């Protein structure tokens, strides 16, 4: 029986994907095999002796100490693309709100008393509507920074809106490149994209090289009056530099899903309460994807969409399967296989992959994996975990 501890409110549709006869699932689970989480901040105190995996029902993993968990052989999954449509639609909303006087217009209308005569109301609107004039998106240029699952669909919808689309992503994967519409004009560097764009939208993870990516130097490359949209993370933008850009008029608007105290009340900002993935559909999609990835890992040892381990898939046979996590140093596989050979255990199939400082092995063997064998493997220097699936 597998144990999965949950944090936050996880979609019931996703949780129903766990077979009840094989899984115990809930927030009260102790010494769990896996954790399923949304935004709850995890730490060392959440690591039990059996914990092998954490699945984040969402794309960002800032609430999980990934480096610490990696050192202890814990796989961290996320669900890239599961909430892409929800975020894409909010980006479109942000584009429209920044281009047209929608919010000021609504606020003005709501200041009018309900005792205003209809004819007077029409006269007022005709007189005042010029204050809320904006621009159309069609024909404008948008720069999409980060061309992963969300950036790609934002680029698609911008094309459908009649915009010219520039794209920049130095770390774009082969799969992402294939998904990208051929109308997207790829840029060699960030400054080239920014200097040519009327709107710039950010779709990047927070990494060492993306933290404060939009700083004073970069803001000086924006067109005067450009709009910056940030539906990634607040840490990607240096707020001090941003405020300087807004106050000088270099930027006309900043639209973000990540409000910070210094931005509250600024008339040039449009701040949303982190609702990019807050739709029923996105929460269900993320939960279903996270559950399926956890199940495939716990039941078969396969890894898909991990942020710290290599992707690995070994077709399951009727044999016994052993999973081993070790530090990525030379000679490890030879030592593991020699232990099996010494006990006349035949290897039927195996797969070994590494990512950075971690390596992961799936080995199918004939017969049973005795506790003694697992103990011998686990005692090898640089082996972190070993278990039977």
Image (cartoon, helix red, strand yellow):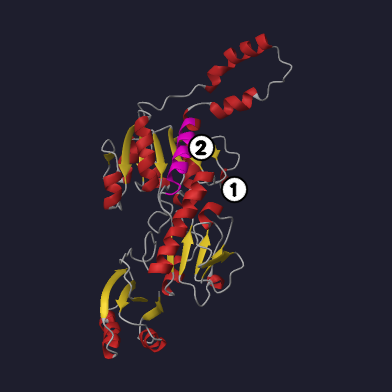
Vertical arrangement, residue 354 with respect to residue 374, above or below: above
Residue 87 covered by magenta stretch = yes
Q: Is residue 96 above or below residue 121?
A: below
Residues rendered magenta in the picture: 82-96
| Residue 286: image location, x then y, percent | 47, 52
Q: Residue at x 57, y 34 (%)?
A: 267
Image quadrant for the C terminus? bottom left
Q: Position of residue 154 (x, y in %)?
A: 39, 39
**Point 44% across, 63% down: residue:** 294
Residue 356 figure quarter = bottom left
Residue 348 marker = none
**Local SS, label 1:** helix
Q: Which residue is mark 1?
A: 261
Q: Residues within 10 Å of mark 1 (few under 14, many from 20)?
A: few
* Distance (Cα) linking label 1 and label 2: 17 Å
Confirm whether the magenta stretch covers residue 312: no
Q: Which residue: 31% across, 75% down?
A: 364
Q: Which mark is residue 247?
A: 2
Q: Is residue 91 left or right of residue 352?
A: right
Q: Who is closer to the viewer here, 22 or 170?
A: 22
Q: Is residue 378 above or below residue 120?
A: below
Q: Position of residue 27 (x, y in %)?
A: 60, 64
Dot placed on the residue nearer the N-terminal end, 1 or 2: 2
> In front: 170, or 196?
170
């Amino acid at each position: 029986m597998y144990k999965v501890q949950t944090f936050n409110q996880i979609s019931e549709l996703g949780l129903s994907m766990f077979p009840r006869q094989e899984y115990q699932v809930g927030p009260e689970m102790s010494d769990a095999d896996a954790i399923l989480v949304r935004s709850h901040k995890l730490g060392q105190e959440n690591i039990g002796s059996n914990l092998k995996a954490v699945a984040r029902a969402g794309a960002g993993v800032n609430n999980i100490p990934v480096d610490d968990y990696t050192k202890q052989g814990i796989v961290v999954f996320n669900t890239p693309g599961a909430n892409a449509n929800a975020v894409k639609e909010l980006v479109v909303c942000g584009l429209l709100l920044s281009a047209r006087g929608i919010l000021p217009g609504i606020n003005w209308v709501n200041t009018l008393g309900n005792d205003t005569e209809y004819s007077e109301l029409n006269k007022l609107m005709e007189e005042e509507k010029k204050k809320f004039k904006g621009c159309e998106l069609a024909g404008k240029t948008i720069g999409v920074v980060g061309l992963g699952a969300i950036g790609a669909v934002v680029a698609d919808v911008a094309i459908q809106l009649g915009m010219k689309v520039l794209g920049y992503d130095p770390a774009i994967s082969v799969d992402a490149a294939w998904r990208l519409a051929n109308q997207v004009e790829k840029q060699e560097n960030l400054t080239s994209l920014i200097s040519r764009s009327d709107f710039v939208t950010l779709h990047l993870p927070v990494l060492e090289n993306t933290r404060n990516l939009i700083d004073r130097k970069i803001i000086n490359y924006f067109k005067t009056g450009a709009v910056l949209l940030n539906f990634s993370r607040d840490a990607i933008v240096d707020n001090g530099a941003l405020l300087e850009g807004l106050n000088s008029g270099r930027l006309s608007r900043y639209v973000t899903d990540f409000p910070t105290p210094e931005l509250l009340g600024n008339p040039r900002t449009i701040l949303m309460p982190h609702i990019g993935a807050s739709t029923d559909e996105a929460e269900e999609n993320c939960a279903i994807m996270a559950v399926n990835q956890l199940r495939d890992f716990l039941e078969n040892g396969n890894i898909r969409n991990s942020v710290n381990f290599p992707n690995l898939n070994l077709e399951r046979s009727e044999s016994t399967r052993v999973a081993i996590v070790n530090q990525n140093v030379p000679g490890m596989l030879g030592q593991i296989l020699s232990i099996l050979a010494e006990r006349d255990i035949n290897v039927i199939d195996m797969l070994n992959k590494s990512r950075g400082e971690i390596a992961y092995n799936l080995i199918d063997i004939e017969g049973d994996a005795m506790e003694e064998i697992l103990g011998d493997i686990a005692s090898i220097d640089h082996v972190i975990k070993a278990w039977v699936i």
